[in-house]
Image (spheres, rainbow, N blue to C red):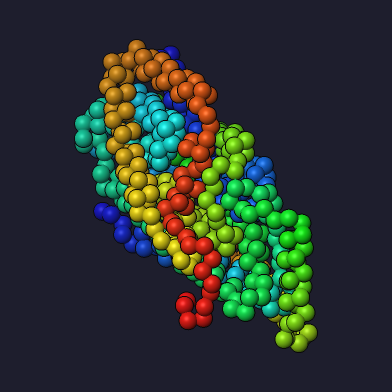
């Protein structure tokens, strides 16, 4: 019994650590654009992002339900998932997240989490452990469709914003007024991030509580204290991650115009909020990247750099299987019983410390500070200042 | 098994929501400019991505905006109307955002 208690505490601690790294990793998603256009001072932007992530975590619990109650078959008809497996899955997710962070590979915290859990469940109970229908409809298809949706939406919004404010007579067009709007749109992105990403950790903790009988599986939403700790963890992560960004600001931000930034952020926020509401657990990073590319294409004289866009896409595709492999290995060790879990914990901790020390040694630069969202702006090439003409619309 | 309709809902909701919000704000800016109040918003902080503006350049931009406003072909009444319409657009835009948040928070409408 004591071992079970220790295990559940470990799972919760690990889940919260994951939540923290998620916030740490994703601050830039919400705040890179307003900082790049000068809509907000970085300090203000980061503080605002942290507060709104906290608020967002309380708004909706649909995504948490998807995770705690859908992908892995539990209960009478399915398997009895154990906290060891969740633990192994989390190790997989965190290890993959840290590796991609260190090497600046594009990835998604959410897919790493799913990958880890899926890998662990398959090792524990075979390929039938996963409800592939739910996996496809709530994770895989949203992952493929959401960035495209966000891209199209942001493209249309950028075109609209530019065409409404365009002036052919060379008089001031007032487009710098979009800077004010960006304060609100980037706040919405931070809020949306809280409604989707904080939920994932809540779902995992709820799942763990159900497995040890601390929560009834019929009661599918997360408990209140779980919501509170997850919200705090992600807000703290956002804030700390932001300070790192502030310190190294000015390294390689892609030029974004206020109108473009506003359109892409509104597209991101709308897509994430709509998806969260329907319980789709998607990657906020990928949605934001899709929006940035879409809005870049919405400007006149723009062209996609397919090489860069392709590299980003391949990184996304790799995330889920890679984390699944790490999760599977961790589950294999955890299967040896209590001591297996301890070995996992020690290995995982050792790895995290190793990565941390490595990252201290490395110069913090463009590759690991600037968000993938900002980097995906480089996938669109924009010619300098083509003059607007009435005939060309 | 796969609920394709849900994807369509997300797409339509995201597209219409964004178009309404961005469109209203852009329209508001356009009307504000028509009404003779050209907003000149200087970046809060200069990063690599922004060309650094000197105070002189900022003053020049403001002067240009003021000059454009003086040469406005609209009558004073029309200008005032445009300005009010601009404020109405901004208010509608804010209302649309708040309505969107209201829709997704179950606690606000008992569902």
Q: Residue at x 31, y 48 (%)?
A: A140
Q: Residue at x 50, y 33 (%)?
A: A21
Residue A361: percent from left, percent from top = 51, 23
- Specify whether B64 is left or right of A195: right
In this view, A241 is above or below A373: above
Residue A375: percent from left, percent from top = 47, 47
Determine if residue A309 is in view.
yes
Residue A334: percent from left, percent from top = 32, 19
- Specify whether A375 is left or right of A319: right
Q: Quadrant of residue A166?
A: bottom right
Which residue extends farthest left?
A127
- Specify whether A327 is left or right of A187: left
Determine if residue B88 is in view.
no
- Of B20 and A100, which appears nearest the observer? A100
Count of numbered tags? 0
Q: Quadrant of residue A232?
A: top right
Q: Residue at x 26, y 53 (%)?
A: B1
Which quarter shows the N terminus of chain A? Answer: top left
Q: Residue at x 35, y 46 (%)?
A: A311
In this view, B5 is above or below A89: below
- Specify whether A243 is left or right of A298: right
- Of B55 and A14, which appears nearest the observer? B55
Residue A294: percent from left, percent from top = 44, 60
């Amino acid at each position: 019994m004591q071992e079970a208690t220790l295990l559940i505490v470990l799972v919760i601690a690990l889940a919260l650590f994951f939540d923290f790294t998620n916030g740490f990793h994703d601050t830039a998603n919400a705040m890179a654009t307003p900082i790049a256009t000068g809509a907000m001072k970085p300090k203000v932007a980061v503080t605002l992002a942290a507060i709104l992530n906290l608020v967002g975590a309380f708004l909706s619990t649909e995504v948490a339900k998807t995770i705690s109650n859908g992908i892995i078959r539990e209960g009478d008809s399915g398997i009895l998932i154990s906290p060891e497996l969740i633990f192994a899955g989390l190790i997989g997710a965190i290890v993959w997240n840290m590796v991609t962070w260190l090497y600046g590979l594009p990835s998604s915290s959410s897919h790493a989490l799913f990958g880890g859990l899926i890998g662990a469940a398959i090792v524990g109970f075979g390929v039938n452990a996963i409800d592939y229908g739910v996996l496809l409809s709530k994770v895989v298809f949203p992952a493929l469709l959401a960035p495209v949706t966000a891209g199209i939406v942001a493209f249309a919004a950028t075109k609209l914003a530019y065409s409404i404010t365009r002036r052919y007579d060379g008089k001031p067009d007032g487009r710098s007024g979009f800077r004010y709007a960006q304060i609100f749109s980037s706040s919405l992105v931070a809020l949306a991030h809280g409604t989707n990403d904080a939920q994932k950790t809540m779902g995992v903790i709820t799942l763990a509580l159900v497995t040890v009988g601390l929560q009834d599986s019929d009661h599918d939403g997360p408990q209140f204290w779980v919501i509170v700790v997850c919200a705090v963890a992600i807000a703290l992560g956002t804030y700390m991650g932001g300070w790192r960004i502030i310190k190294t600001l000015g390294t390689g931000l892609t030029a974004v115009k206020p109108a473009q930034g506003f359109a892409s952020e509104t597209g991101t926020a709308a897509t994430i909020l709509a998806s969260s509401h329907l319980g789709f657990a998607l990657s906020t990073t990928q949605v934001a990247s899709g929006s940035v590319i879409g809005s870049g294409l919405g400007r006149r004289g723009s062209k996609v750099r397919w090489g860069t866009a392709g590299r980003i896409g391949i990184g996304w595709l790799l995330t889920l299987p890679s984390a699944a492999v790490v999760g599977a290995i961790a589950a294999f060790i955890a299967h040896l019983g209590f001591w297996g879990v301890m070995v996992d914990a020690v290995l995982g901790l050792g790895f995290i410390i190793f990565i941390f020390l490595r990252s201290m040694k490395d110069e913090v630069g463009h590759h690991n500070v600037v968000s993938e969202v900002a980097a995906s702006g480089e996938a669109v090439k924009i010619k300098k200042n083509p003059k607007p003409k009435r005939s060309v619309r | 098994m796969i609920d394709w309709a849900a994807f369509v809902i997300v797409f339509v909701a995201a597209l219409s929501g964004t178009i309404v919000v961005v469109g209203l704000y852009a329209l508001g800016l356009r009307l504000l400019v028509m009404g003779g109040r050209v907003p000149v918003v200087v970046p809060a902080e200069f990063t690599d991505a922004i060309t650094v503006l000197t105070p002189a350049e900022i003053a020049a931009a403001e002067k240009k905006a003021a000059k454009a406003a003086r040469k406005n072909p609209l009558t004073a009444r029309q200008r005032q109307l445009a300005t009010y319409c601009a404020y109405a657009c901004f208010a509608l835009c804010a209302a649309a955002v708040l309505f969107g948040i209201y829709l997704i928070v179950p606690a606000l409408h008992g569902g």
